[in-house]
Image: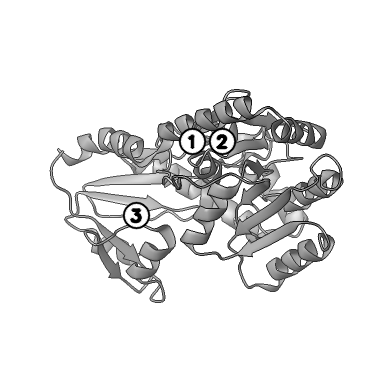
């Protein structure tokens, strides 16, 4: 494939390229970075003469003047019908109903005008195909290797994910902390539970976090808010077990957007030999091979039982499982991403 010059467009003056490098721990020295203002319609002017325009949008269509357009679709939207729109309006969710109309425009535009549609998991791809007839290619996100050589595992369970109040894939820290409290003073005596994630400053989100902290006071449960990369890396490497609860209690068929779309933090944990015990919904099912490199669970009793079996299993079986998680991570690493991305973009650039 020929040499490619890449420029990131940003409409937020407060976000600097150095901020992205620091937050994502990546080198963007060879990447251009351009701030623009005037709304999304400006992109049509800015992309004149461009070979490929890559757009990630969750509900707004973004037309361009590029020779080729690529649409990244990361949300597995449930069916949007006249009945579902009327139902949302009746429930007082006017804003969401309006967004659904925008989503229909985005998906229709993507089918008709876009040269390449990419989804971040087979789960998302299958849902969009079933509900909207979109035929996409799967490009799993590139997962960084968080492994630190020689760092010992401890009696720690870890969860990583945003603290937020919103429509998509709630991480269900409420039920995970409840499960840990249930067994922390008996079956998992001496173990700790750590939860790391970014947290917005809006009142609803802060209230949710305050409630979680108050409920778990007195238990060996720690909250790590907006931690830097290095601290997160040490948490991954010190943890033995990784918990993920997004999608619990959700009807995956009717509300696919409310389960985990892929599960990047699960793979990040696996890169350090941390054994995942994750909800059997959404994209998690294509990451974890049950019994080989982690465990899937459907009920809280299954989550508890599988966690206890790891915690009290023999050293050899635990070591073998950790090796398998590390091996599975290689299927989603940066090299695999580069290989797949090159195959997908080559026809658009030659």
Q: Under tag 2, what secondary structure?
A: helix
Q: Is residue 187 visible?
A: yes
Are dots 2 and 3 in contact, CB under 8 Å?
no
Task: Decide which of 113, 24 is in the foreground and name it.
Answer: 24
Are dots 3 and 1 in contact, CB under 8 Å?
no
Q: Left or right: where does residue 302 sit relative to residue 275?
A: right
Task: Decide which of 275, 340 is in the foreground and name it.
Answer: 275
Residue beneath disc 1: 121
Could you tell me residue 171's position as x and y percent?
67, 50
Q: From this view, report whether residue 125 is shown above or below residue 63.
A: above
Name the residue: 56% across, 26% down. Answer: 320
Q: Left or right: where does residue 116 sit relative to residue 265?
A: left
Residue beneath disc 2: 283
Between disc 2 and disc 3, the foreground one is 2
For marks 3 and 1, give the CA distance: 24 Å
Name the residue: 63% across, 62% down. Answer: 224
For marks 2 and 3, give the CA distance: 29 Å
Q: Earlier in the sequence, mark 2 or mark 3?
A: 3
Please identify the residue farthest to the bottom as the structure is shown: 14
Q: Under tag 1, what secondary structure?
A: loop
Q: Under tag 3, what secondary structure?
A: loop
* Image quadrant occupied by the N terminus: top left
For marks 1 and 2, give the CA distance: 6 Å
Name the residue: 36% across, 72% down. Answer: 16
Q: Is residue 288 visible?
A: no
Q: Earlier in the sequence, mark 3 or mark 1?
A: 3
* Image quadrant occupied by the C terminus: top left
- Count residues near mark 3 (Cα–Cα under 10 Å), then give few for <14, some for 14-19, many for 20+: many
Are dots 1 and 2 in contact, CB under 8 Å?
yes
Between disc 3 and disc 1, the foreground one is 1
Residue beneath disc 3: 63
């Amino acid at each position: 494939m020929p040499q490619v010059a890449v420029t990131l467009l940003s409409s937020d003056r407060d976000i600097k390229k150095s901020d992205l490098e620091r937050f994502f721990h990546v080198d963007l020295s060879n990447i251009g970075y351009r701030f623009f203002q005037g709304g999304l319609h400006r992109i049509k002017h800015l992309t004149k003469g461009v070979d490929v325009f890559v757009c990630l949008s969750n509900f707004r269509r973004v037309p361009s003047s590029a020779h080729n357009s690529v649409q990244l679709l990361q949300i597995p939207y449930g069916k949007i019908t006249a009945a579902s729109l009327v139902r949302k309006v009746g429930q007082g969710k006017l804003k969401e109903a309006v967004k659904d109309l925008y989503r229909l425009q985005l998906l229709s535009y993507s089918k008709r005008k876009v040269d390449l549609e990419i989804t971040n998991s087979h789960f998302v791809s299958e849902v969009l195909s079933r509900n909207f007839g979109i035929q996409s290619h799967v490009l799993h996100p590139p997962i960084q290797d968080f492994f630190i050589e020689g760092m010992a595992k401890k009696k720690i369970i870890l969860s990583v994910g945003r603290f937020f109040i919103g429509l998509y894939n709630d991480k269900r820290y409420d039920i995970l902390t409840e499960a840990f409290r249930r067994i922390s003073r008996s079956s998992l005596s001496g173990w700790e539970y750590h939860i790391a994630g970014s947290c917005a400053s809006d009142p609803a989100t802060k209230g949710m976090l305050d409630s979680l902290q108050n409920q778990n006071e007195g238990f060996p449960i720690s909250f790590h808010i907006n931690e830097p990369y290095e601290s997160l890396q040490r948490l991954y490497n010190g943890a033995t077990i990784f918990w993920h609860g997004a999608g619990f209690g959700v009807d995956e068929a009717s509300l696919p957007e409310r389960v985990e779309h892929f599960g990047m933090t699960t793979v990040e944990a696996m890169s350090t030999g941390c054994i995942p015990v994750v909800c059997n919904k959404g994209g998690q099912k294509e990451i974890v091979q049950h019994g080989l490199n982690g465990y899937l669970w459907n009920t809280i009793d299954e989550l508890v039982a599988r966690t206890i079996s790891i915690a009290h299993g023999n050293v050899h079986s635990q070591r073998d499982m950790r090796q398998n998680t590390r091996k599975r991570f290689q299927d989603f690493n940066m090299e695999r991403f580069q290989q797949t991305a090159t195959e997908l973009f080559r026809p658009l650039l030659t």
